[in-house]
Image (spheres, helix red, strand yellow):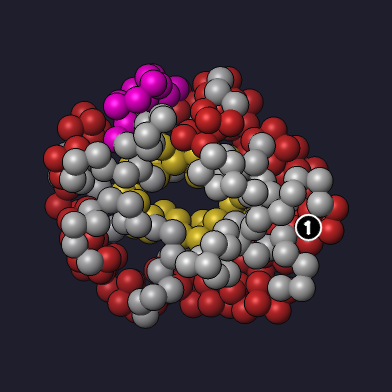
């Protein structure tokens, strides 16, 4: 049976962030994820997880100036000191919450920018070495350029080839079904091919990024395939509820754990 993590950046936005943990637990989720926890003290986030019996599936490393349009700094030459400080900041939250996966965003750069690609791969190696002693995986996620114009890592095949070439045991692919369908399609075959290097999976309907089951894909068939493949991690629900979070949770009823 698939296990799902509510993405608290997108779901339960009807209440402030620290109140969303209670809403997720009440809805039946065993885990949560989110983009960035850094507006809140690490212990405050950890307390919400403990209080509501939730696991933390994932969060992102600091992305640079998010409000100003940056989408990661790992591939940006000249930002090395800030990148390394971001690793240290993320470690504080990882230690407090017990998370075992962090997503490292690449940043905005042309795919053929040799300097950006070299810096990105150097950053991957640094992050891998930094988090390996903590047993934490560093995840790389291709993003479609419709939602994130100019993003460096915009191809699942290229991402998979790089991960395999680098051969770092704790560097894995973050397979977002929404992004993959927009970029390439052929979801089931890509899942089968890339499954050995996948560290986390996320889902949303296509094309509007709403609840599973509301778009062009057979989401139930995809979830069944993940069961067949033996995926044991959480599936992150990184979607925008169409008409309120609780009102849109009908898709989740067959998967809700019995407590």
Nearest the viewer among 151 and 99 is 151
For this view, does 205 lie left or right of residue 77?
left
Q: Which residue is drawn at the image coordinates 65% and 41% (left, top)?
A: 154
Q: Which residue is drawn at the image coordinates 81% and 52% (left, top)?
A: 113
Q: Is residue 94 above or below residue 114?
A: below
- Residue 14, x across and y down, in percent: 18, 57
Q: Is residue 22 above or below residue 80?
A: above
For this view, does 125 lie left or right of residue 218?
right
Q: Quadrant of the N terminus?
A: top left
Q: Which residues are magenta?
A: 211-225
Q: Is residue 33 magenta?
A: no
| Helix, strand or loop at mark 1 | helix
Q: Is residue 216 magenta?
A: yes
Characterize the local packing of mark 1: few (<14), some (14-19) or many (20 or more) Cα atoms within 10 angstroms. many
- Residue 136 visible, this orientation: no
- Residue 148, x across and y down, in percent: 55, 47
């Amino acid at each position: 049976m698939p296990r799902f993590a509510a993405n608290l950046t997108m779901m339960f936005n009807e209440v402030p962030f620290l109140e969303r943990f209670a809403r997720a637990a009440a809805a039946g989720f065993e885990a949560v994820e989110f983009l960035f926890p850094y507006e809140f003290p690490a212990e405050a986030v950890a307390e919400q997880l403990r209080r509501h019996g939730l696991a933390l599936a994932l969060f992102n490393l600091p992305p640079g100036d998010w409000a100003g349009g940056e989408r990661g700094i790992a591939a940006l030459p000249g930002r090395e000191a800030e990148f390394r400080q971001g690793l240290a900041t993320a470690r504080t939250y990882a230690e407090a919450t017990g998370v075992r996966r962090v997503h490292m965003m690449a940043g905005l750069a042309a795919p053929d920018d040799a300097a950006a690609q070299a810096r990105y791969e150097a950053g991957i190696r640094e992050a891998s070495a930094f988090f390996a002693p903590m047993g934490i995986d560093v995840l790389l996620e291709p993003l479609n350029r419709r939602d994130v114009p100019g993003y460096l890592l915009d191809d699942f095949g290229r991402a998979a080839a790089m991960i395999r070439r680098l051969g770092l045991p704790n560097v894995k692919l973050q397979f977002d079904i929404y992004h993959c369908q927009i970029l390439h399609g052929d979801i089931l075959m890509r899942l089968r091919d890339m499954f050995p290097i996948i560290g986390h999976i996320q889902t949303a309907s296509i094309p509007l990024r709403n609840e599973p089951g509301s778009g062009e894909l057979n989401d139930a068939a995809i979830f069944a395939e993940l069961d067949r493949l033996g995926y044991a991690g959480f599936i992150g629900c990184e979607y925008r509820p169409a008409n309120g979070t609780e009102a849109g949770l009908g898709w989740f009823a067959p998967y809700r754990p019995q407590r």
